[in-house]
Image (cartoon, rainbow, N blue to C red):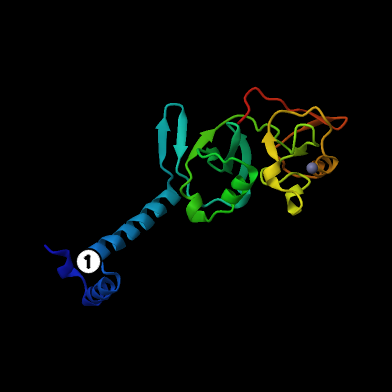
Amino acid sequence: MNPFDKIPSAYKFTLKQLSIKTGKPEHHLLIMALDDLNEKFRHSLLNTKPSITHQSTKVTHHLSSDYCLSQLEIIPKDGQLGILLRSDQGIFITKHTYKNLVEALTALGESASVREKWIWTAITGNYPVVIAQKKPSHTPHLWLGQNTACKMFNSQSNNPRQYSLTTTLPMQKMCKICISNYNHLKNCHLDIKVVNGIIVGPLYDNALF
Ligand SMILES: [Zn+2]
């Protein structure tokens, strides 16, 4: 049976017009349309039931892009930066890493369709304190995933490119605004301990990253 025989004449006409316009054969255009439909169908399946692939101890998750930007956090990973997602299904981390804060912040700003391609790995453990610092000798700031607690990057004069993230607790006093803002935060995932302006904990053996 030739599937073309079953196509209503209005679609046949559209196919012919599209074929003339694009220079592509009619059957090719039909396959492209079906591909598109297939993709949409696959996404709708993923949105309701994420597919889970077990890879030894790691779980790779193809999450839908149905999460908000506020659930994403930039975190230090393998000497670079990764993206962490807190979801109802657990905590996940991207496979891909970014060289610096500008690249990572740009990635967060990508469209949902770009984010949909990210591959997530489930992780467990306690959330360590993340410090943003220009240089090891400079004032340490408390990192809250997308900005410091003192919202340093709201000011154009602070270039995120110059800052790095670390989970190593600094020896010098923390930024006072960061600590003051932290004390006013509600439902913060961190439970930091500060003594005389110096952050001393928490310290975890099973840190998330
Ligand atoms: Zn600060």
Q: Nearer the viewer, residue 130 or 66?
A: 130
Which of the image's four quarters has the C terminus? top right
| Residue 57 on image: x %, y % | 46, 27
Among all residues in the image, which is located at the extreme left?
1
Which residue is pictured at 26% across the width and 69% down the height? 23
User: In screen coordinates, is 171 left or right of 93?
Assistant: right
How many marks the image carries: the answer is 1
Quadrant housing the N terminus = bottom left
Residue 170, image x, y percentages: 77, 29
The furthest residue to the right: 196
Image quarter of residue 29: bottom left
Q: How many C-alpha atoms fall within 10 Å of the one at disc 1: few (<14), some, or many (≥20)? A: few
Left or right: 165 as drawn, with respect to 93: right
Q: Residue at coordinates 71% horizontally, 25% vertically from top-left?
A: 203
Residue that carries the numbered disc 1 in the rendered image: 25
Is residue 150 left or right of 128 when viewed as pictured? right
What residue is drawn where x is 25% and y is 66%?
A: 24
**Which of the two residues, 129 or 191, is positioned nearer the viewer here?**
129
Locate residue 150 relative to residue 40 in the image: left or right. right
For ligand 1, give the image quadrant.
top right
Q: Position of residue 174 (x, y in %)?
A: 82, 35
Residue furthest to the top: 205
Q: Position of residue 126 (x, y in %)?
A: 64, 30
Name the image quarter holding residue 18.
bottom left
SS at mark 1 in the image: loop
The amino acid sitting under disc 1 is Pro
Confirm if mark 1 falls within 8 A of ligand 1.
no
Q: Residue at x 41, y 30 (%)?
A: 55
